[in-house]
Image (cartoon, rainbow, N blue to C red):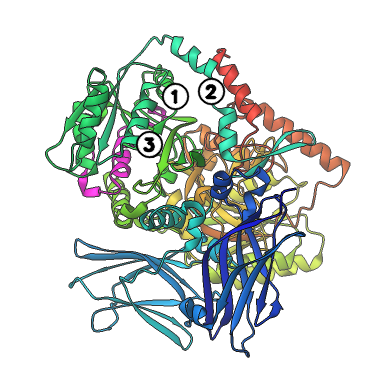
Amino acid sequence: MKKTQINSYIDSCEYNNNPLERSIEITGWCYSNDFKEVNYKCYFNDKELPVELYRLKREDVSTHFKLPADLLLSGFFIRVHLPKEEDVSKVELYAFTDEENRCILKLNDKSLKKVENTTIFHYAIDEYIQERNETILTGYVYTNNLSNVSIEVLDRNKIKIEDASIQRIIRNDVVERYKLKEKNSLLGFVISFSNLEKSPYYLTFTLDNHCLTIPAELTQPLSNLLKSYYKEFSMDRLKNAWLYLQENGFRRFIQRIKLGPGKEVELSYNEWFDITKPTDIELSKQKEIKFKYEPLISVVVATYNTPEKFLKEMIKSLINQTYSNWELCIADGSDNNSVKNFIIKNYKDDQRIKFKKLNENLGIALNTNEAISMGTGEFIAFFDHDDLLTPDALFEVVKVLQDKNIEFIYSDEDKIISETNLLIDPYFKPDFNIDLLRSANYICHLSVVKADLLKKIGYLDPSYDGAQDYDLTFRIIEELDPIQIKHIPKVLYHWRMHQSSTASNPESKLYAFKAGQRAIEDHLKRQNINGKVSMGYALGMYNVEYSLKEDSLISIIIPNKDEGETLLRCVESLEHKSSYRNFEIIIVENNSTEKDTFEFYKTLEAKYENLKVVFWNDIFNYSAINNFGVSFSNGDYILLLNNDTELIEPDSLKSMLGICQRKEVGAVGARLLYPDDTIQHAGVIVGLGGIAGHAFLNTPKDSGGYFNRVFEAQDVSAVTAACMMVKKSVFEEVGGLYESLKVAFNDVDLCMKIRKADYLIVYDPNALFYHYESKSRGLEDTPEKVERFNSEIKTFEDRWNDFLEKGDPYYNPNLSLMGDSYTLENPDQIKKRRGENLNGK
């Protein structure tokens, strides 16, 4: 019988010994050869102490040692709190099963000193870059109690630099690494300042009476937890992995997929993709299809010292395309001849592959421009030198191009970990979304543009290095109508993660954040839109504050039945908190029964000159009540607002109005929170749950959700009328709220009418309210209410059946409409739809 043996490795050990804490934190992996669960115990000076254990997924360990799938949780993070009153002489960590007990870490007072942290501050400087008379650095700092640490930048004489820009950002990787209590805390920072001298500069961290000053260029040892993914590779690779995780956290998209009544299965995205990708038979059929229009596609690639393995796989993914009318244009800026020699050796006889060795490395923008100049195709496809196309990528592009109006195409994408070939982080994108594009460069890969259009607007601009594709995308879409831009809702592009790739190494993005900001600013200028662009809630995100064209009057319509305290809270939050002051409040009294309510109305009208009460004397009809209230309004903008809301962010009205004043916008919605600080509304997805549902429902307030969409302004199909700003002219143009929908879906119906009239509906994350959810109306808890609700579902379906069948353009069909938003669709449904499309249905 095989003897039980415990195998383990300690990645890191840290001894925190400061005024706020005394603890040991240990990371590593451990498993037994009989695959039994391993537990842990810790002895401090021979006395056992409680162990705070967090089991971690270790795909690298499972893959390397060929462990069963249920042993993914072989990693651990252990925290042990030590007594403060006793000196430390010995610490031992044991791993054990019912048959084996093994000491996997032993420390004495000397070895503990080597890993001791005596300050209250946990920090790291990830990158320190000086260029163009500007210093940019990123990092994080936190204390054990997660209090807000203040940061100052000092010059060489340790005098504060007053004009330093200090942007606090989310660092969920740090939260995950150290198992902190609060997710989405602003632990990270991006700092920039003008530098007259190259060095030195200093950072000062301050909390209460604690202060620490460090050299700004100091780079702390990287978190050893990253060895859980890149254990056997160089420190450069660990560094790059850290930067990748800094942006993306540990997002692995593993979830339970409902396959039918009572049937569920847990799938990683990698497994999901393998199930849903085209079969070999389907790919063979694609090769046999003859399109009426078969344009030549020039696939442009800029190479620079590309490893032979990646170069070979990149070209192979193109050769394996099921659509054959393409050419590959490679412009090589390498400082050696390795790429040239490889191409000559392997592809000199392939006329589709064009190669040009550049005299010097001109940078990514100009190198790519050289590749574009080599192309003779009607369309240009952008392809990074180490990434991969799916076999059906160009086939799907040409299928779309049968519509001759289309001039710009983009697809969904994911990332592939080079060392393991695991697919992660699928970005299932919306159809063209101008507001989301101004919040983040969501288009990215795969992108294909008409060659004539590219010649007209000019190629990549090196002055935006690091964000040159972002700038180009803006210049492309400025020339097109939205109907000329096509999104293919399929992953056609694998963005490779390896030690020198952008996917795992956003080093270039440290200066590119500023370039991205300039790209948006210049785009707005070209569009004659006044707005201030600032860094967003996390790296790679931006916030556009649209300048107010005029101090417009906002008419706030609030229906109310009794609920005096609820209404008072709503009104006073507006009157006392709002930074925007030009508004009137119209309370629509709806059949109140309590005498005190009417006395309360008189008190409000006497207290606030900009408030009046109007009286609705008919039966309850939410649509008719609001239409009635609007008829008394004097403003050019209407804010439909529930009485059970409370303003949180003072600039909410200003932010919503800035968006709503844009000529193409019809309505704007806000971010609404439940009283427990979870998301009640962050936009409406039409079709979710059958008719419509709120995105990111019950997500914690500070969570960004799928690709941080909670914190990004974006176009949506609908927003809730619990807090909806509408141009009055648009409200009247579409006939207001549809009064046959007395209770449910009237706000979604209104948004659908606004969209049909070719206006945008925008979700504004910077407008923030509490929403106590239909408190005055009550629940659908009687047979009569249930019947009415079902009747209104039928009414909505009859009015918008075509839209429901096509699907919400801002919600990707690879995402499920059943259950929580932004989860993977049942793979059987994906295959079914693909089969119908193949058969021409």
Tell me which segment is drawn in magenta: 458-486
CA–CA distance in space, label 1 to label 2: 9 Å
- State the residue at coordinates (17%, 30%): 356
Front-most of 262 and 617?
A: 262
As rendered, which of 306 and 518 lies closer to the eye? 306
> Where is mark 1, residue-wise?
391
Residue at image mark 2: 278
State left or right for residue 785 relative to residue 488: right
Question: Label 1 crowding class (10 Å Cα cut-off): few <14, some 14-19, many 20+?
Answer: many
Three-letter code for the amino acid on which mark 3 is drawn: Asp
Reply above or below: 739 against 170. above
Q: Which residue lies furthest to the left in this view?
A: 359
Q: In this view, does 391 lie to the left or right of 817?
A: left
| Placement of 390 over or under 181, stated as above or below | above
- Secondary structure category for the residue under label 1: loop
Q: Percent from the top left, x then y, of residue 486?
A: 42, 29
Q: Which mark is residue 387?
A: 3
Q: Distance between the residues labelled 3 and 1?
A: 13 Å
Q: Where is residue 664 in the image (x, y as percent from the top left)?
A: 42, 41
What's the residue at 48%, 81% (across, down)?
Answer: 113
